Each structure stands twice: as C-alpha cells, then as structure tokens.
Image (cartoon, helix red, strand yellow):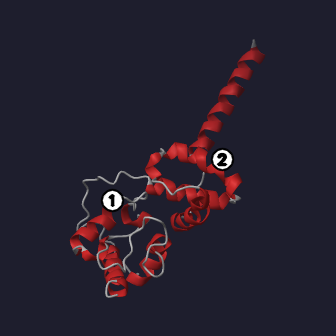
C-alpha cells in the first residue's frame, strides 16, 4: 500500500512539473525577424494568409511541424511563432491611444523607431517588404490619410482591405509610447511621402 501511494505521489508530481514547463514553452522570439522569415520562407510555398486564420495554440503546432520542411532553426521558428501570435490580434478594438497614454520619456528618433519596429514589414524603401503590406510611396496609399487616422491605425493595429496580414498594435512593439508613434509617423511622411 505504501508503494502504491508513493507511485501515485510521484506520478502527480511529474504531471504538475510537465504542466508548469509547458506553460512557458516556447520562449518568445523576435517579432521583426519572424516577419522576415515568414515572408522569405513560408511565402515560397504558401500564399501568405492572415495570422488570425488559426488560434495562437494552433500556430504552435503548425510552426513546429513546418520548421522541419522549411529547415528553420529553433530560434527562427520561435521568431516566426512570435510574429504570427503577435499579428493574431483582433483589429476591431475600441481602445484609443491618446497623448496622455504611456507618457514615459522617449529618446529614440523616428528613423531609429522605423529601423527597429517597422522595417521588417514595410521595408527600407517603404514599399512594403511583405505581400499585402501597404506601399508608403504610393500617392494614393496610406500616407494620403490624415495623421489622426494613421496614429490610430499604428497605435491600435489595422488590416488594409484585401490584405491577408494585419498590422499588430504598435507594429508589434508594446514598448512604443505615443511620442514614439508620432515620431515614427513624422519620419515615414518625411522619408516616403514626398515621392
């Protein structure tokens, strides 16, 4: 009887240990790097589809099955998973970011913010590095909209009509504050808007 109770205790102990490890697996990857890998690798064989076609837990299974076919490293697959799960947002949010939101002091320039957060999807030339990503240099493109509309799209996320991919809130970078978002929009307008 003692052996049986010890075995049961051991079984329960191992079960709870496995559950706790599963809760934090896989480790987060890099959103921007994941976007690039997604476009370069997955887009070769698949039409790039919206991240919200699958739930976050389904993306885990999909990414880890497909990483073998794509020849991705563990880090690359975590990056892709972070991108997919970060893009898998409900874009019909009612939260509006205001000037009072997240007022911590920003020290980055608009160019630095673009290079860290936006360039993976929108490209160095602003023409859109991924299929379905808007072209900033198009005179009828997103920069033809008013700043308040664009600030809301950047802050809260947006999906262009007909695009398979949605832009996650703050471009997937939750550290951006309202000043950062305004600086990045100013940089985008100055760099790509006058072409």
Residue that numbered label 2 is attached to: 65
Q: Nearer the viewer, residue 21 or 93?
A: 93
Quadrant into which the C terminus falls? bottom left
Residue 28 visible to an observer of this rendering = no
Picture quarter containing residue 165? bottom left
Q: Residue furthest right?
A: 3
Q: Nearer the viewer, residue 109 or 162?
A: 162
Residue drawn where x is 33% and y is 73% of the image: 181
Residue that numbered label 1 is attached to: 161
Mark 2 to mark 1: distance in Å? Answer: 30 Å
Q: Secondary structure at mark 1?
A: loop
Question: Residue 29: x and y, percent?
Answer: 57, 60
Q: Secondary structure at mark 2?
A: helix
The label shown at residue 124 is none
Residue 75 visible to an observer of this rendering = yes
Picture quarter containing residue 12? top right
């Amino acid at each position: 009887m003692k052996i049986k109770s010890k075995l049961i205790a051991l079984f329960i102990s191992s079960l709870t240990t496995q559950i706790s490890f599963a809760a934090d697996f896989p480790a987060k990857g890099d959103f921007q790097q994941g976007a690039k890998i997604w476009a370069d690798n997955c887009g070769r064989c698949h039409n790039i589809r919206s991240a919200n076609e699958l739930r976050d837990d389904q993306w885990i299974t999909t990414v880890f099955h497909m990483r073998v076919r794509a020849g991705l490293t563990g880090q690359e697959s975590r990056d892709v998973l972070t991108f997919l799960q970060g893009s898998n947002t409900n874009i019909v949010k009612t939260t509006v970011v205001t000037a009072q939101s997240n007022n911590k002091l920003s020290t980055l320039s608009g160019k630095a913010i673009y290079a860290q957060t936006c360039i993976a999807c929108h490209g160095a030339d602003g023409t859109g590095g991924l299929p379905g990503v808007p072209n900033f240099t198009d005179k009828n493109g997103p920069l033809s909209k008013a700043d308040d509309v664009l600030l809301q799209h950047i802050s809260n996320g947006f999906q262009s009509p007909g695009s398979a991919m949605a832009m996650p809130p703050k471009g997937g970078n939750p550290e951006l504050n309202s000043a950062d978002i305004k600086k990045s929009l100013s940089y985008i307008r100055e760099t790509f808007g006058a072409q």
